[in-house]
Amino acid sequence: MTLYLGIDPGTQGALCLLVPESKGRVWFCDTPQTKNLYETLLKIHNWFRHMQYPLYAAIEDVHSMGGMGAKSNFQFGRNLGLVEAITHLQPWADKIEYVQPKVWQKGCGIVFQYPNEMSTPHRAALRKRTVAKHALELYPKAEIYGPRGGLKDGRSDALMIAHYLRLKYEGVQNGTKT
């Protein structure tokens, strides 16, 4: 059994542990609070260092962008720094890599089509909905919506990053071996 961990370190990010052999079971941890992220990564580290299963992890290779508030950029940097420190200084994964959003999206077969007149904020919203739709098609039981019905896009991104790893290392297409 191989486990896959997708990490979206953004301010509304998440971690997703994908266990394919358990009928595609997924486990999420949202990352908006640094304390929560630190404790979660330590729990994962302590759990995996005793397991015999291979674990592949991918961290979304992203950066802060202009137009983001100072607080968001600061929190984003803290989340990314914690992920990097815990995964690299206390290695618990067999392989840790960075993957750019366009790479994992293409690898998962996610294609975005925008009308020419669509604004940047509307494009971002369409991207989030498209990724979520694709995630639910592959993993219908994944809890990517909050209790009030709002999309937790960090979860769908983290799940698809984990799925990208699964495709890369197992040659899986749409949940079945190729």
Image: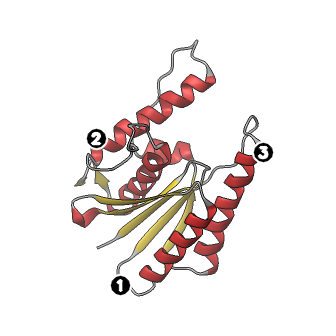
Query: What is the x, y in percent for residue 171?
Result: 32, 57
* Residue 177: % across, % down: 23, 56
Q: Does residue 172 lie above or below 95 as drawn?
A: above
Mark 3, residue position = 70
| Residue nearest the viewer, comparing 178 with 59 | 59
Where residue 137 is drawn, which disc sits there?
A: 2
In the drawing, what numbered circle is on residue 52?
1
Instruction: Tell me which numbered mark, 3 or 1, is placed earlier along the sequence.
Output: 1
Position of residue 40 measured from the top left corner of the image (x, y, whole percent): 51, 70
CA–CA distance in space, label 1 to label 2:
30 Å
Where residue 81 sits, quadrant-wise, is bottom right
The amino acid pointed to by label 2 is Glu
Give the Cα separation between the discs numbered 3 and 1.
42 Å
Q: Which mark is residue 116?
A: none
Q: Is residue 96 above or below residue 128?
A: below
Q: Is residue 93 visible?
A: no
Three-letter residue code for mark 3: Ala
Q: In the rendered view, tell whether residue 2 sits above or below residue 7.
A: below
Which is nearer the N-term, disc 1 or disc 2?
A: 1
